[in-house]
Amino acid sequence: MKLLASILPLFLFLLLSNLPPAAFAQEKANNWETYKGEKCDYQIGLPGEYQISEETVTAFDDETELTQDVIDYKKIFDLENALNMNATCRQLAEGERDVLSTDFIQDALDAYISSNNIFVAGRKVSKDDENNQISGIIIGARGDSDDSFLTTQYWVGSNSLLIFELELTGSDTIENQDVFANILSRVKLKDPS
């Protein structure tokens, strides 16, 4: 909880204000890699190489089989401090976009929280009609851990679903916070270019 308490005010402000975390984070790395999956509406910028694999999943209709990208990134700062990012992105099956409402995302976050023993410090579910997307975001910690801070985000675009989790473990340092905030600022709709 110590780590959570020290960086929670910044992330609560960012969560509730819709301001990009990059406005507060110092840019340190210049060799960022960007995931832009072919069937994903979103992109994720990461400070270095990431692992990507594909897996077969079933759509919400329990019949349609789809492949999704699984994106993993880990950064170890030292023996006690690390950052882990896990994300999945997949194209939506026909008719799925109609099922994925703000209520659905709220229920998905509730299920995630209870099945993963998450202490929630902040939560927001919103709909952006202009960009035809729905997002659900939580920030908190795993259980009653003193050295964990995480965000889990569900992003529903016009054609895909992105589930993104970023967790920081260890001591609270400026470097840890900067990398965390910089990654968060790079989770967005794909650049049209």
Image (cartoon, grey):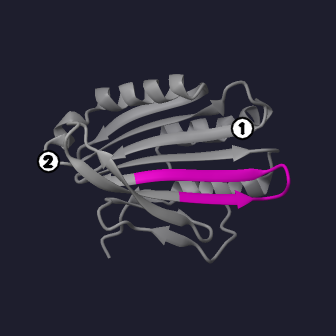
Amino acid type, residue under disc 2 in the picture:
Glu
Which element carries disc 1, helix, strand or loop? strand
| Range shown magenta | 72-88
Mark 1–mark 2 contact, CB under 8 Å?
no
The residues tagged by marks 1 and 2 sit, at their Cα atoms, a distance apart of: 38 Å
Residue 91 visible in the current orientation: no
> Which of these two is toward me, 34 or 55?
55
Residue 58 visible in the current orientation: yes
> In the image as oriented, which residue stretches furthest toward the left?
95
> In the image as oriented, which residue stretches furthest toward the right?
79
Residue sitting at 74 percent across and 52 percent down? Answer: 82
Q: Tell me the tag on residue 94.
A: 2
Residue sitting at 46 percent across and 62 percent down? Answer: 53
Which element carries disc 2, helix, strand or loop? loop
Question: Of the residues tagged 1 and 2, which is closer to the observer?
Answer: 2
As drawn, is 55 to the left or to the right of 143? left
Q: How many marks?
A: 2
Q: Is residue 61 magenta?
A: no
Q: List x then y, in percent, for residue 84.
A: 64, 51
Mark 1 nearby-residue class (10 Å; few <14, some 14–19, many ≥20): many
Q: Would you say the magenta stretch is mainly helix, strand or loop?
A: strand
Q: List x then y, in percent, for residue 65.
A: 24, 49
Q: Which quadrant would residue 119 be assigned to in this image? A: top right
Q: Earlier in the sequence, mark 1 or mark 2?
A: 2
Q: Tell me the tag on residue 148.
A: 1
Mark 2 nearby-residue class (10 Å; few <14, some 14–19, many ≥20): few
